[in-house]
Amino acid sequence: MSHPAASVPAVTIRVPAKVNVQLAVGPPRADGYHDLANVFLAVGLQDRVTARPAPRLSITCAGPGSALVPLDGTNLAARAAELLAAHTGRERADVHLHIDKDIPVAGGMAGGSADGAAALLACAELWGTGTPREELLELAGRLGSDVPFAIVGGAALGLGRGELLTPLPVGGTFHWVFALADGGLSTPEVYRECDRLRGEDPAPAPEASPALLAALRDGDAYALAGALSNDLQPAAISLRPSLEDVLEAGSAAGALAGLVSGSGPTCAFLAPDAPTAARIATVLEGSGTCRAARATTSPAPGAGVLTISGA
Ligand code: C5P
């Protein structure tokens, strides 16, 4: 595709956050990761990543919590641009990436992974690499365990360290409220705490719950509420005991069920319908147990092009 000389091409990708409706964690592996049965559900909170040509790789970030986002080569969006440039034989990752953040930073909703996924797609589009989707998913898996799911979206079972995805059918819309925390939790620390709390007790091999998969397939919020589980929840609560208060506040406000999202500290609450979700969000915001509360729905689509300009 050719660009008019005067225009500056820009590609904006929107990318969803995720909640794990089941996170079954096996024993630690030799490579430091854990085998998982990880049921991902993409939700309506999203980041936007815009890629523009630039002399060298640079990143800016705006939005809540953006001060906590690294703007150097450790940012997954930067690593995605470098990886795609190397993979496609491009001399340099000559791109500026701007991240509009809405997904909580270090919140257990895969915000960093989402930005990595979005940057991969944005650079592929900007540079016209024509990289097949399967190859992008493979590169995404190298960037991080949660990155491929941000591309796929919807709902999926993640095996291995979470990156081996099988899409799952979802038979309806689920209503969620997310209680956002001040400050984040470190994912490696939460996994380490999980291992420490388990001590010598051997963790069983992780398996997806048939009841949970049926609830998703049927779009049955009540059945899903009964089947939610997160093996990292005790570890997140051990590191941040105040999460107990958040979970209690959400259940007192009328949630069908609540759980810590991924490695936390965001807490997720399932509601029977949109008006109840809005009420729960208002009550949670007034409870003083969280920084903010957001009502949204799932499933949401995976990363996709929002706008292309100057092309
Ligand atoms: O894959 P990702 O870089 O997102 O993982 C972050 C950290 O979370 C890993 O370094 C590891 O400590 C932990 N992790 C794990 N087992 C997984 C996924 C992540 O122990 N399956």
Image (cartoon, helix red, strand yellow):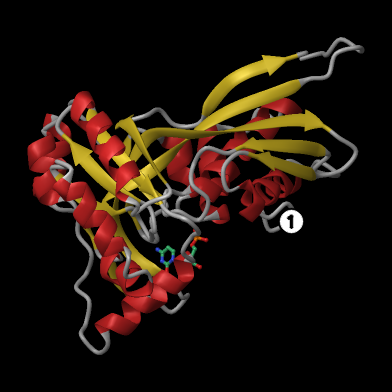
Residue drawn 13% across the image and 45% down it = 225
Queried on whether the Cβ of the residue with tag 1 lies below 8 angstroms from ligand 1, the answer reads no
Residue located beneath label 1 in the image: 73
Q: Is residue 166 visible?
A: no
- Determine whether the residue tagged by mark 1 lies in a helix, strand or loop: loop
* Quadrant (top left/top right/bottom left/bottom right) for the C terminus: top right
Frontmost residue, 111 versus 77: 111
Above or below residue 205? Residue 224 is: above
At 19% from the left and 56% from the top, the residue drawn is: 248
Q: Residue at x 31, y 68 (%)?
A: 237
Q: Is residue 59 left or right of residue 249?
A: right
Identify the image quadrant of the N terminus.
top right
Residue 231, picture quadrant: bottom left
**Mark 1 burial class by Cα count in 10 Å: few <14, some 14-19, many 20+:** some
Tell me which amino acid carries mark 1: Gly
274 and 298: which one is in front? Answer: 274
Residue positioned 8% across, 41% down in the render: 223
Q: Nearer the viewer, residue 167 or 55?
A: 55
Residue at the extreme bottom: 200
Q: Total marks drawn?
A: 1
Q: Is the residue 166 above or below the residue 234 in the image? A: above
Q: Is residue 95 above or below residue 30?
A: above
- Left or right: 270 with respect to 235? left
Q: Position of residue 272 (x, y in %)?
A: 14, 32
Q: Classify residue 225 as left or right of residue 177.
A: left
Image location (x, y in percent) of residue 104:
49, 46
Residue 3 position (above or below residue 224): above
Q: Position of residue 212 (x, y in %)?
A: 14, 46
Q: Is residue 159 visible?
A: yes
